Amino acid sequence: MQDQFSAFCKLCECLEGCVVRQNIPMAQYTSFRTGGCARVLVEPQNVEALRNALAVAQECNIPFEVIGNGTNLLVSDDGVEAVVFRIGDALASIRRTGGTFFAEAGAPLSLLAKRSVEQGFMGLEWAAGIPGSIGGAVAMNAGAYGGEIATLLQSVSWMDPQTGAISETIPHDGAFSYRYSAFRAPECIVLSATFSLQPDDGSARMRMAEYTEKRREKQPLSFPSAGSTFKRPEGNFAGALIEQCGLKGMRIGGAQVSTLHAGFLINAGGATSSDVYALMCQVQKVVYENKGVLLEPEVHLLGNFALSAQKKGGGAK
């Protein structure tokens, strides 16, 4: 595998529009601020560079992963033995035509939301405090305060990583559900999306300010986290179940169940990804034993957490 990664890097040196680096700490690229190194990190500067680098990865027969802003991601302390493609600032343009907003996958969702309100449109006010990228928001059908991406999408442009083919799809029934979309990596790589928004009726700024204030009051924004750690169980709330089980403030290493909002697991200082993962498992175990509900992680795991747990002495039981 070492020779394959070396071959990949050498071939990518011949490609235009690719920034390629080796052994990069993923703690720099995740909102938890934890995680080991990516064997190779590629930041394509344009769509063609992404297509070409993906073709090289397949030619070298090495695995790949795709990330955005890393705000819903927990990377193993052992790192990622794969090529990690990061869709970032180079693919982050936003533009408007009438009430239709176009945004590339690397653009921050919060920026699109704020810009849409500033330009006199409503529909995305709920997203002004969400730190993820457009690509990630589409892939997971991000939502908050009763709003969600799927209701506003006009079209999605995506790449098939196996063939490099680019398609533009109009969302259809079955393509989206709660925290799920048909545009998830690695089967699809979101390149951009268009959103159809309505003219502001005069209330958008007020709603955006209200949502922002709610987040400040109820969410532990001063600590590294990935937002809501678990999906909302049908007919209930993950945070409420966790709090009812008396788990607020529970710690494993530097990871803690937030004392402000039990639905958030935070890096309270010096946490490792193994700490966070062990705490996730323990919270699941206790909630299931006491409430009969198995909480499903909303956070995406990247890397070998079973191996990390073994090295640390077995992890959470």
Image (spheres, grey):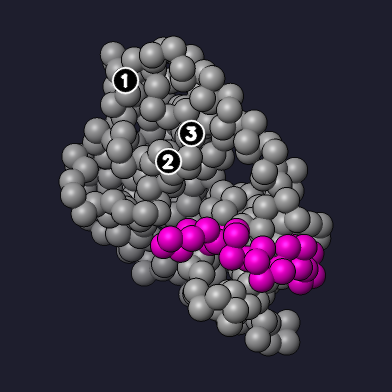
Q: CA distance from mark 3 to mark 1?
A: 14 Å
- Reading the image, the residue beneath label 2 is 146
- Residue 208 has which mark? none
Q: Position of residue 192 (x, y in %)?
A: 33, 36
Vertical arrangement, residue 128 with respect to residue 191, above or below: above
Image quarter hosting the C terminus: bottom right
First in sequence: mark 1 vs mark 2 = 2
Q: Secondary structure at mark 1?
A: strand
| Residue 241: in magenta span | yes
Q: Which of 155/185 is in front?
A: 155
Of labels 3 and 1, earlier in sequence is 3
Residue drawn at x 41%, y 62% as measured from the top left: 234
Indicate yes or no whether the magenta region holds residue 240. yes
Q: Position of residue 65 (x, y in %)?
A: 44, 60
N-terminal of the pair, mark 2 or mark 3, is 3
| Count of numbered marks | 3
In percent of the image, x 55 and y 50: which residue is there?
70
Mark carried by residue 126: 3
Marks 2 and 1: in contact by CB < 8 Å? no
Q: Toward which corner of the image does residue 228 lie, by quadrant?
A: bottom right
Query: Dots 2 and 3: beta carbons under 8 Å?
Result: yes
Q: Amino acid at mark 1?
A: Gln
Residue with the mark numbered 1: 198
Q: Amino acid at mark 3?
A: Trp
Please name the predominant secondary structure of the magenta segment in the image: loop
Q: Residue at x 52, y 58 (%)?
A: 237
Q: Which residues are magenta?
A: 229-256
Alpha-carbon span between mark 2 and mark 3 = 8 Å
Q: What's the residue type where badge 2 is placed? A: Gly
**Quarter-of-image position of residue 276:** bottom right
Q: Helix, strand, or loop for circle 3?
A: helix
